[in-house]
Image (cartoon, grey):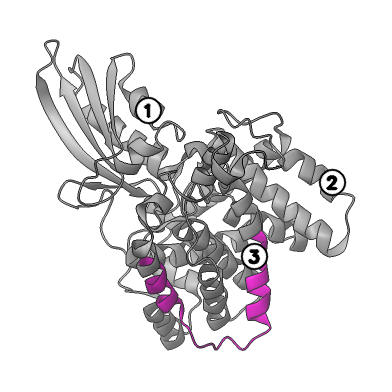
Amino acid sequence: MKSLQELFRIGLGPSSSHTMGPRFAATAFSAANPTAARLRVTLYGTLAATGRGHLTDLAVSAPFSPRPVDIVWLPEQSLPRHPNGMQFEALDAGGRVLAARLVYSVGGGALLDEDGQPDGGGEVYPHAGMDAVLDETEREGLRIWEIVDRHEGPAIWCHLANVWKSMQRTIATGLNAEGRLPGTLKVPRKASAYHARAQSLAGYFGQTALQFAYALAVSEENAAGGEVVTAPTCGACGVLPAVLFFLQQNARLPDEKIHRALATAGMIGNIVKRNASISGAEVGCQGEVGTACAMAAGAAAQLLGASVRQIEYAAEMGLEHHLGLTCDPIGGYVQIPCIERNAIAAVRAVDCAAYALLSDGHHIVSFDEVVRTMWETGRDLKASYRETARGGLARIHALRSKGSGPFRGMGS
C-alpha cells in the first residue's frame, strides 16, 4: 500500500475523481507542453456523463489559461482501464498534435497512466489487507497508528497535522456560510442553521445535531468548490472530519490524539483502496461514503479507547452496512443525495464505534471479507448506478421533473 499522503489530499471540490484528479493531470500536462498554442481534452465515460455538474471542464481548463481549450465530451465511450478516462492533446497554431497523454482518474485524486501505472511514490506498507495489519499489531504489541509511524516515519505526522488543520478550517467556513450552493438545483446550505438549532437541544438529539452540522459544513463547502481533504474522496469528505471534530470537542482531546486517529482511519481507507475501490464510477457510493464511514468508525473507536480488534470491528460494520449503495447524483452534482449521506454516515460511524466497544471485538465477518464483497457488489452494479446520473434517484427525479409516467402530479 502507498503512503497516507496519497490518500489524504488537500484540494478543491467538488469531486476528487472529476475535479481534483483531472486538475492534477491537466497541470502536469500543461507544464510539460508550455509552447502549445491550444489544447484539446477529450473526456470519456462517467467523466463526460457528469463532468459539467462536477466542474470537470473548469478543472481541466484552468491550468492551461490563457491558452484556449477545446473539450470533447464522449459519455458513451469508455476507455479500458477505468470509467474515468481522459486524453490531453497539445496542438500547434495549425491544429497539429504535438503531444498527447491518456490518463485515468481513479478516485481520491489519484491517477493511472495509459499502461496502468499509478502516480506518486512506490509502496510503503507491505500489508495485503487488514488481517496482515492485525497480525503485526498482535505480534509486535502495536496500535494501528504505530504501524503507520513505523512504516512512514516522522514526515507523516506533519502531513496529518496539515490535514487536520485543513479539516478544521473547512468546518469553520462551512458553519458560517449561508445561501445556496452553485448549480441548477439551488440547494440551500443547512450547516449554519443546523448548528444553531443544535445549541438548544440536549442529550442524544443535541449531539446528533452537532454531528450533522459538522458533516454538512464540510460537504457543502465541497459542493461549492471549496478546500477539502479527500477522506477518502471529495464526495465523502464530510464524514471523517465531522466525527473527529465532534469527539474532540466533546472529550477535549488534544490534536495529537486526532492525528493518531487520522493515521488509523488512513490505514482503513488504504486497505479499501488497494483491494477494492474508492471510486464511485467504479463501485458506486459504497466505495466512497461506505469507506468514509468505515474510516470514521475505526477512528472513533480508537479515540474512545477501543482495542485493535474492536477498531477493526467498527470499521467492518461501517462498510458492511453501506454495501450496495449506488452513486446516483441528481443532475450530476455532488449535492443530492451526497451531502445528506455524509451527515447520516457520520452518525452511523459513531454508532458503529459504540457497538464495537460493547463487544469483545470478536465477530464472524472480517473487514477484509467485507472489502472483497464491496468490490464484487460494485462490479455487479449496472453502469447507470455508478456515477453516470442515469439511474436511481437521478433518473427518477428527472422523470418526475418532466411530468413523465406515474410521477405526474405527485407531491414533494
Q: Earlier in the sequence, mark 3 or mark 1?
A: 1
Q: Earlier in the sequence, mark 3 or mark 2?
A: 2
Q: Which residues are magenta?
A: 346-375
- Give percent across and percent down for residue 8: 45, 52
The CA span between labels 2 and 1 is: 38 Å
Q: Residues within 10 Å of mark 1 (few under 14, many from 20)?
A: many
The CA span between labels 3 and 1 is: 35 Å
Q: Residues within 10 Å of mark 2 (few under 14, many from 20)?
A: some
Of residue 85 and residue 92, the one placed in the foreground of this image is 85
Q: Is residue 12 above or below residue 160?
A: above
Residue that sits furthest to the top in the current view: 93
> In this orientation, does residue 222 appear?
no
Q: List the residue tagged with mark 2.
A: 197
Q: Main secondary structure of the magenta part?
A: helix
175 to the left or right of 137: right
Q: Quadrant of residue 91?
A: top left
- Give percent across and percent down for residue 378: 38, 62
- Give percent across and percent down for residue 54: 45, 35
| Amino acid at pointer 2 | Arg
Residue at 58% x, 48% y is 337
Q: Is residue 147 above or below residue 394?
A: below
Q: List the residue tagged with mark 1.
A: 57
Residue at 57% x, 74% y is 314
Q: Secondary structure at mark 1?
A: helix
